[in-house]
Image (tube, rainbow, N blue to C red):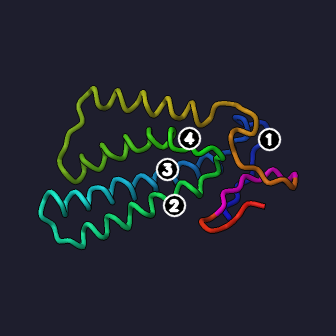
Amino acid sequence: RVVCRMGEGQGGGWSPGAVALSCVLFLVAGLCEVGGGWLVWQALREGKPWWWAVGGSTALVLYGVVPCLQPMSDFGRIYAVYGGFFMVLAYLWAWGLDGFRPDRGDVVGTAVALTGVLVIMLWPREGGGLEVTGDGGGEVVAARAGETQS
């Protein structure tokens, strides 16, 4: 289990540690998705060896697991917020590895989207949408793959 201490009354339950954990997990998920998709693309469209597609497929499976580690409890909200992180990572990946240069519209649109998903993520709501242990200790918990919440 991944555990972060909740802040008292901070942003609907979000502490700096919970925000950092969530952002790191979004980045890892994005690297798995964008990197995995890019490897498959390279194998199928650019003539790279078949094992690039296998590596990409493995990364895409990991992409499906990483969001399960999020401290947020709502599937739909996790994937909606992830969309903004995905946009940033997709542009950075394409810029760094393929020489794609985002234009002003790409940058402005991505900034608006990322701002929007941070509003969704951090909006003050009951429990902040976080999974909280029932022991009164105020801990935010994300179960690792294969674990059950008790």
The three-letter amino acid code for the residue at tag 1 is Glu
Question: What is the C-alpha distance between the residues marked 1 and 2?
Answer: 30 Å
Front-most of residues 11 and 52: 52
Local SS, label 2:
helix
Residue at which label 3 appears:
26
Mark 3 or mark 2: whose residue is earlier in sequence? 3
Magenta residues span 136-143
Left or right placement of residue 30 versus residue 20 in this view = left
Residue at which label 1 appears:
8
Q: Residue 76 carries which label?
A: 4
Q: How crowded is mark 3: few (under 14 residues within 10 Å), some or many (20 or more)?
A: many
Local SS, label 1:
loop
Mark 4 or mark 3: whose residue is earlier in sequence? 3
Q: Are marks 4 and 3 in contact (CB under 8 Å)?
A: no
The three-letter amino acid code for the residue at tag 4 is Gly
Left or right placement of residue 71 versus residue 150 in this view = left
